[in-house]
Amino acid sequence: MWFRFLVGPAVGALNCHVLAELGTERYDFAWIDKGVCLWPETVRKIRRLARKLVYYTPDTSFMANRSRNFRATASLYDLIVTTKSLELASFERLVPRERIAMVTQCFDSRLHYPRCTFAEKRKEAVLIGLCEPDRERCVEHLISHGIAVRVGGVGWVRFVRRHEGNRLVQYEGEKVFGQRYAEVLSNATVGLGLLTKRFPELHTTRTLEIPACGTALATERNSEISRIFSDEEAIFFTDYPDLGHRVAALMNDEVRLQAISEAGTRRVHTGDYSNDQVLRKVLKLVGIPCGAAAAAGSGYVQAGAPALDNTIGLDCDTVAQDG
């Protein structure tokens, strides 16, 4: 609990560990991933040791995940990288615009890939993520059209209990991560890439992870998602009744549904949306060239290796994630 407020013994232990491990060694490049829990003195030491210092966050920084530590150290970074266009103005109040980069969310090409053929898929829609009232309404509309829906993530227990005995509602549990997450996405025919209504985001990691796993993405249409996918590569809907009609029709037109699935998968796997490709973009922005290994999308580590002798990466989100 204390870690969620960015105070307490766990935060202190983390910073003391980082400070002790840093020593005096110099680094070509340092990457801080959602470092909301890093003390200013910790970031200042990394700044002194690193030739280039980048801050990356895939989440909001001024709505959820607010951090006095980050605001106090933002000016120390060579580049701040965000996936949230809605927060660009807030970042600009801390640092000049030229030190801010907007990138898309990304997927892990080693984890998010098709696990089965289209013929082997379950005839269902899948929604993995935090339960919200709006998402419950979405599932209600789908099952009213006779569409089976598999849900998983935090907060779905009460919804599932209300539908106990309904064969159209399947529950994967609260913890659906890693290989299991990718398999659940891949085994479904339609993946629901719903955006949260807690804040006005325009795409999410699921926007890319679902098609990366070989499943047709169902998503609302907006300026960011429309730049990634065409009507042939995703199932765009205007509201949940429209979604229900579209998915029901596609469940009865497997040729069309398979075509959308395969086109969406090609789009993300051949585009610049993997972790490797996004890292390559960021390295280029801070003046670090990448070799052929990166251009081929051959790996997270290899992407920086051709030009870097010594690097450090701190992923604070693995400790401070908010579920």
Image: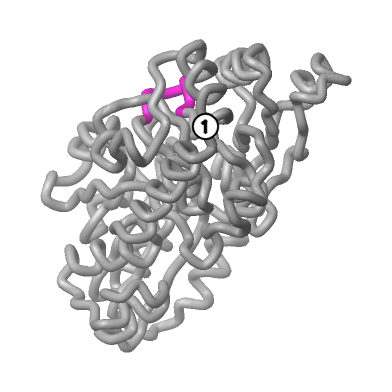
In terms of depth relative to the viewer, which is nearer, 68 or 321? 321
Residue at coordinates 50% horizontally, 45% vertically from top-left?
210
Mark 1 surroundings: few (<14), some (14-19) or many (≥20) residues within 10 A = few
In terms of depth relative to the viewer, which is nearer, 207 or 69? 207
In terms of depth relative to the viewer, which is nearer, 294 or 316? 294
Q: Quadrant of the C terminus?
A: top right
Q: Which residue is mark 1?
A: 253
In the rendered image, residue 64, in percent from the top left (x then y), is placed at: 46, 32
Is the residue 291 above or below the residue 227 in the image? below
Q: Secondary structure at mark 1?
A: loop
In the rendered image, residue 137, in percent from the top left (x then y), is placed at: 60, 13
In the rendered image, residue 10, in percent from the top left (x then y), is placed at: 65, 54
Is 225 on the left or on the right of 301, as rendered? left
Residue at coordinates 23% horizontally, 36% vertically from top-left?
88
Q: Any magenta on residue 319?
A: no
Is the residue 175 above or below the residue 283 in the image? above
Is the residue 235 above or below the residue 271 in the image? above
Q: Any magenta on residue 198?
A: yes
Residue type at mark 1: give it. Answer: Asp
The answer to whether residue 139 shows anywhere in this view is yes
In the rendered image, residue 158, in percent from the top left (x then y), is placed at: 78, 20
Stretch in magenta: 195-201
In terms of depth relative to the viewer, which is nearer, 253 or 65? 253
Q: Quadrant of the N terminus?
A: top right
Residue at coordinates 45% horizontally, 81% vertically from top-left?
23
